[in-house]
């Protein structure tokens, strides 16, 4: 289900209309819009709160954006901008779909989002508390956002149990299947911080001296992913297998279109687009 609703949320990061909406309220530059938009449900917070909640960003990078972005746009203005841009982006991707399709998808996704357990999940909680959208695409995007932040909170909790710090997590993953060139810059870590992190990963048994993943690391990473899935399962149990499968069917054409603007190296972690026929035959989780 995450592979179906994550692309819907992600239009806020990659679609030109989303960027334009942020710029219209004074948030010029990609990272101003990103940090203001994603942090806005928390209120006019300063950098330490976002460093903790977002997990993988270098504190210095966050501090360049917060709290200064709140002098450019209030959290309320940032919230309106992010929803406006996301809805405009989704409208571009869904104009060929019947209104009934969008309404049904929004209804089901909104119901799932309404079943999230918010205790211990800061970003999931503040997004779940936002007012309900007025139109189907607004409701669809906000529900997708609540579910993805809820899942992300659970993922961060699972990562914390590994004993790794944020730069170690990102550096390790880049030794497995991601690009250091992309992710180091996207998360703001310096060369010195990155090199020191890899040295600590060797000392902790996560990397070999040749900088390849150890068996211990691979097994622990699998445990983290399984824990993330379990922590995110509540809304789908509540929705039930039949309606979850129906929602997946409704989201598939929307997610497929949304994925066309997500860069291959984006740090979201979506797997490669899978064969739709095989997906359709897979059991709902």
Image: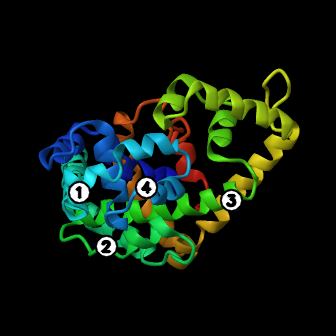
Please identify, in this view, whether the residue under mark 2 or under mark 1 is nearer the observer: 1
The disc, 2 or 1, on the residue closer to the chain's N-terminal end is 1
Which residue lies under the disc numbered 3? 158
Looking at this view, is 84 or 139 the one in front? 84
Q: CA distance from mark 2 to mark 4?
A: 18 Å
Are the residues at dot 2 and dot 4 in contact (C-beta closer than 8 Å)?
no
Which residue lies under the disc numbered 1? 78
Which residue lies under the disc numbered 2? 130
The disc, 2 or 3, on the residue closer to the chain's N-terminal end is 2
Which element type, helix, strand or loop, lies under badge 2?
Answer: loop
The disc, 3 or 4, on the residue closer to the chain's N-terminal end is 4
187 horizontally vs 63: left or right:
right
Q: CA distance from mark 2 to mark 1?
A: 13 Å
Looking at this view, is 98 or 228 the one in front? 228
Looking at this view, is 93 or 141 the one in front? 141
Please identify, in this view, whether the residue under mark 1 or under mark 3 is nearer the observer: 1
> Is any atom of residue 48 visible in this view?
yes
Binning the other alpha carbons within 10 Å of mark 2 as few (below 14), some (14 to 19) or many (20 upward) gives few
Which residue lies under the disc numbered 4? 5
In percent of width and height, residue 283 lies at: 61, 59
Binning the other alpha carbons within 10 Å of mark 1 as few (below 14), some (14 to 19) or many (20 upward) gives many
The disc, 1 or 3, on the residue closer to the chain's N-terminal end is 1
Which element type, helix, strand or loop, lies under badge 4?
Answer: helix
Q: CA distance from mark 1 to mark 4?
A: 22 Å
């Amino acid at each position: 289900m995450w592979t179906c609703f994550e692309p819907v949320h992600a239009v806020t990061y990659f679609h030109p209309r989303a960027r334009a909406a942020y710029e219209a309220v004074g948030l010029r530059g990609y990272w101003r819009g990103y940090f203001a938009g994603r942090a806005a449900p928390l209120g006019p917070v300063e950098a330490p709160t976002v460093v903790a909640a977002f997990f993988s960003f270098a504190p210095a990078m966050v501090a360049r954006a917060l709290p200064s972005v709140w002098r450019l746009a209030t959290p309320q203005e940032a919230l309106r901008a992010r929803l406006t841009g996301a809805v405009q982006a989704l409208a571009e991707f869904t104009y060929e779909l019947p209104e009934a399709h969008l309404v049904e998808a929004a209804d089901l996704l909104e119901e799932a989002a309404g079943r999230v357990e918010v205790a211990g999940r800061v970003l999931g909680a503040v997004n779940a508390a936002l007012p309900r959208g007025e139109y189907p695409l607004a409701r669809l995007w906000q529900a997708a956002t609540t579910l993805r932040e809820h899942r992300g909170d659970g993922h961060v909790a699972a990562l914390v149990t590994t004993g790794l710090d944020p730069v170690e997590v990102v550096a390790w993953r880049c030794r497995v299947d991601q690009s250091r060139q992309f992710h180091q810059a996207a998360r703001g870590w310096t060369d010195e911080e990155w090199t020191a992190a890899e040295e600590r990963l060797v000392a902790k048994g996560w990397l070999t001296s040749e900088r390849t993943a150890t068996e211990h690391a691979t097994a622990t990473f699998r445990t983290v992913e399984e824990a993330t899935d379990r922590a995110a399962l509540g809304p789908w149990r509540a929705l039930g297998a039949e309606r979850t499968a129906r929602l997946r069917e409704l989201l598939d054409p929307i997610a497929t279109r949304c994925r066309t603007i997500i860069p291959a190296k984006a740090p979201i972690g979506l797997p490669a687009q899978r064969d739709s026929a095989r997906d359709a035959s897979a059991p709902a989780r």
